[in-house]
Amino acid sequence: MGLTGKNSLKPNIDIQIATNEGAPFRITFAPLSVADVYAQADDAANGAVVMMSGTVRSQTAGRAVEYLEYQAYEPMALRVFQDIATQIRTRWLDVNHVVIHHRTGRLQIGEISVLVAVGTSHRAEAFAACQYAIDTLKHNAPIWKKEYWRDGQSEWVSIGACEQLNCEVST
């Protein structure tokens, strides 16, 4: 389903908000697929597809990480993903596709937590738009991350959107 009318920046671009496979904006407990996200951003009109993959690292600030747990306020997060795509298309007019997928639940070291892909005519715009997408997502999307360390301690981090909303995260 493409956007039409006053919300349409590029009427042939598919902007559906859904959690099902094949949707450009997705929040899921299932593992993310680099190949699927790339395929959604790819297009014959593209000169470049840039993808960012966020993974669970083994250390944070010198502390050994056991695993991460992500929670999201899904309807609002998906709306933020769509808003990010709209902002990108306003700023970089040659963007053909924006794809944002994020995991929730428990993720082990090395698992992919987020994938962002941007397909556009030129590489400079693709890199800039992809960086804008992940930076804006981390700041605006109501997605929370709790780090569990090997020493048995844990802490909530990356709650920029929650700070803006003045909300509390349950433990």
Image: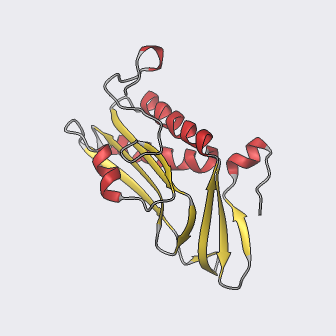
53 or 169: nearer the viewer: 169
**Which residue is farthest bottom?**
151
Q: Report the number of numbered marks.
A: 0
Q: Quadrant of the N terminus?
A: top left
Q: Residue at x 66, y 79 (%)?
A: 149
Q: Quadrant of the C terminus?
A: bottom right
Residue 91 position by quadrant: top left
Q: Is residue 64 above or below residue 122?
A: below
Q: Is residue 113 above or below residue 88?
A: below
Give percent across and percent down for residue 125: 37, 40
Q: Residue at x 62, y 66 (%)?
A: 69
Give percent across and percent down for residue 75: 59, 40
Say whether residue 116 is left or right of residue 165: left
Say whether residue 156 is left or right of residue 12: right
Q: Is residue 28 above or below residue 119?
A: below
Q: Residue at x 56, y 58 (%)?
A: 104
Residue 9 position by quadrant: top left
Residue 121 position by quadrant: top left
**Which residue is farthest left?**
44
**Which residue is farthest front?**
20
15 or 130: nearer the viewer: 15
Give percent across and percent down for residue 5: 43, 14
Give percent across and percent down for residue 21: 38, 48
74 or 132: nearer the viewer: 74
Q: Residue at x 73, y 48 (%)?
A: 162
Q: Is residue 36 above or below residue 97?
A: below
